[in-house]
Image (cartoon, grey):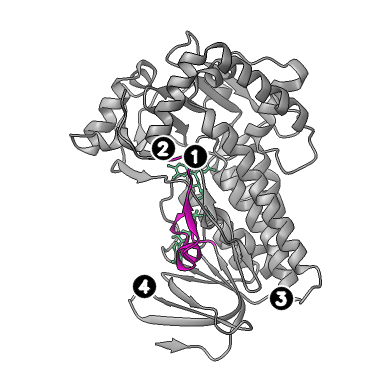
């Protein structure tokens, strides 16, 4: 085991979007930052669809032009419902703030590598193949992180501040036994990359498609130069009901949806189809005197609104301010940490309201026939664009939308209550009564 004599200021665990963005800001400000990343980049990661309001973060980090070069423009999201005749497309240009009409679809291997290389350029030291195993916080002035490198050799490093950006591994939340399953949500996904998926023409080529089916929903994310990311998100009992191979189960579910069957009729997988439990969770602890949890390491809800990278960059960039305040012994450090926690939780709460209701008939009916009374539609488009942390006045129109949603649900109580109960059984892990 090697214990280095001198510590660094900040040891970031995980080189995904949250860790790399935080490391870039702090390294640029002159702090001695090191990043331990378990998997050498570029490496595969799911989650290729970005939001328009992520672009200002990329600009702030100085990587927007690089991302533009590897991205396919995405102007909106197409919604396909099995009980509505025609799909509809919600365009980001319909949002309240018209200055961000598009986002990008990216291969995460390339995108995450750009972010990691960027923080290295700004002075952070990157150690790929280094996996954190445990942190000793017994000395409040200097934490010791223990782990192993790619050769399996035990390693350790002292740091004044430890950042957990390990994504859904939720390293510190697990160590603190602070990781709690989300009582309101639970889902699983099966996905892969495919050649030959039918795309839309021209400006709509890069749009995301969300297609509901009986047990959940599919995504179609066209990637630059041909391949397409396709996945299904379903309640865990549906995945557990599988009696064939994962691949056959995936294709069988594709065939159950006329829209998906059409889009995938010539498609061939270019990677093995894999399954992952999304198991929504949140940590009960986010910050302390010498640690912070950012991105998925703190919480993960569901991928339907493509909000994961946006929230990860938001918490990485804002989290850097909190870390800096603690390192400087700033009198406001604890207040900054509380403000940070409130902002992160606001983002999660904002998206969770939609995620919990997105499979309800009332929600689907409203989504498929958008109305802009009291700027409701603009507010929804703003949320879908990621415009939830600034001063755009989405609050009042969203209250109206929520009121309309509850009223619509009441008017068709039987269908909505039935779906609510089905979902509740599925979330709580009980078998479907169907
Ligand atoms: C099925 C699915 C689909 C999704 N689709 C989208 C989408 O379309 N758009 C979107 O924005 N988001 C999507 N997401 C969510 C998105 O992928 C994540 O929210 C985002 O990657 C979070 O970034 P992060 O930096 O917090 O974590 P990650 O990107 O997961 O990065 C964590 C890094 O930490 C490293 N690591 C883990 N443990 C250790 C350790 N012990 N020591 C050192 N390193 C470690 C990992 O190797 C990894 O590189 C999706 C998620 C799922 C599950």
User: Vertically, is 196 above or below 172?
Assistant: above
Q: To which residue does mark 2 refer? A: 427
Q: Dividing the image into 4 quarters, which one contains the C terminus?
A: top left
What segment carries the magenta color?
165-187
Q: To which residue does mark 4 refer? A: 150
Q: Residue furthest top?
A: 85
Callout 2 secondary element: helix
Whether residues under marks 1 and 4 lie with C-beta atoms below 8 angstroms apart, the answer is no
Q: Is mark 2 within 8 Å of ligand 1?
A: no
Question: Which of the 4 quarters of the picture holds residue 400?
Answer: top right
In this rendering, would 271 be left or right of 29?
left
User: Vertically, is 134 above or below 191?
Assistant: below
Is residue 320 something that shows in the picture?
yes
**Structural distance between the alpha carbons of marks 3 and 4:** 30 Å
**Structural distance between the alpha carbons of marks 1 and 3:** 37 Å
Whether residues under marks 2 and 1 lie with C-beta atoms below 8 angstroms apart, the answer is yes
Callout 1 secondary element: loop
Which numbered disc flags the more N-terminal residue, 1 or 4?
A: 4
Q: Nearer the viewer, mark 3 or mark 4?
A: 3
**Structural distance between the alpha carbons of marks 2 and 1:** 7 Å
Instruction: Classify mark 3: residues with Cα within 10 Å, few (<14), some (14-19) or many (20+).
Output: some
Q: Position of residue 57 (x, y in %)?
A: 68, 49
Question: Residue at coordinates 45% horizontally, 36% vertically from top-left?
Answer: 225
In this rendering, would 245 be left or right of 351?
left
- Residue 184 bears which disc, if any? 1
Residue 57 within the magenta-colored segment of the rendering: no
Q: To which residue does mark 3 refer? A: 327
Toward the viewer: 426 or 311? Answer: 426
Callout 4 secondary element: loop
Question: Residue at coordinates 77% horizontally, 19% vertically from top-left?
Answer: 374
């Amino acid at each position: 085991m090697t214990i280095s004599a001198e510590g660094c200021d900040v040891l970031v665990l995980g080189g995904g979007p949250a860790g790399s963005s935080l490391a870039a800001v702090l390294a640029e400000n002159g702090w001695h930052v090191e990043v331990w990343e378990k998997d050498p980049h570029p490496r595969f990661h799911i989650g290729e669809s970005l939001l328009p309001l992520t672009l200002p973060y990329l600009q702030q980090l100085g990587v927007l032009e690089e991302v533009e070069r590897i991205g396919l423009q995405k102007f909106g999201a197409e919604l396909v419902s099995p009980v509505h005749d025609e799909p509809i497309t919600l365009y980001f240009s319909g949002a309240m703030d018209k200055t961000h009409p598009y986002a990008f679809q990216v291969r995460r291997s390339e995108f995450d590598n750009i972010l990691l290389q960027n923080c290295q350029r700004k002075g952070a030291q990157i150690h790929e193949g280094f996996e954190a195993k445990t942190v000793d916080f017994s000395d409040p002035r200097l934490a010791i992180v223990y782990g192993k490198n790619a050769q399996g050799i035990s390693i350790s490093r002292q740091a004044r501040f430890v950042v957990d950006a390990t994504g859904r591994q939720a390293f510190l939340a697990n160590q603190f036994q602070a990781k709690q399953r989300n009582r309101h949500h639970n889902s699983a996904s099966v996905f892969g990359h495919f050649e030959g998926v039918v795309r839309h023409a021209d400006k709509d080529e890069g749009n995301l498609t969300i297609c509901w089916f009986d047990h959940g929903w599919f995504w179609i994310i066209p990637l630059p130069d041909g391949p397409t990311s396709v996945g299904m998100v379903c309640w865990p009992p549906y995945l557990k009901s599988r009696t064939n191979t994962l691949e056959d189960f995936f294709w069988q579910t594709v065939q159950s949806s006329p829209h998906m069957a059409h889009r995938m009729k010539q498609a061939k997988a270019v990677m093995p189809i894999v399954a992952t439990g999304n198991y929504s969770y949140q940590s009960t602890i986010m910050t302390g005197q010498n640690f912070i949890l950012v991105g998925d390491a703190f919480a993960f809800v569901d991928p339907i609104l493509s909000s994961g990278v946006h929230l990860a960059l938001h918490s990485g960039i804002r989290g850097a301010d909190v870390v800096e305040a603690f390192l400087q012994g700033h009198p406001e450090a604890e207040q900054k940490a509380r403000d940070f926690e409130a902002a992160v939780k606001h983002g999660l709460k904002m998206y969770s309201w939609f995620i919990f209701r997105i499979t309800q008939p009332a929600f689907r009916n409203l989504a498929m026939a958008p109305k802009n009374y009291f700027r409701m539609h603009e507010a929804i488009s703003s949320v879908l664009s990621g415009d939830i942390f600034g001063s755009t006045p989405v609050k009042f129109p969203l209250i109206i939308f929520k009121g309309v949603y509850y009223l619509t649900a009441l008017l068709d109580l039987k269908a909505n209550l039935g779906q609510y109960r089905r979902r509740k059984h599925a979330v709580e892990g009980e078998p479907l009564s169907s």
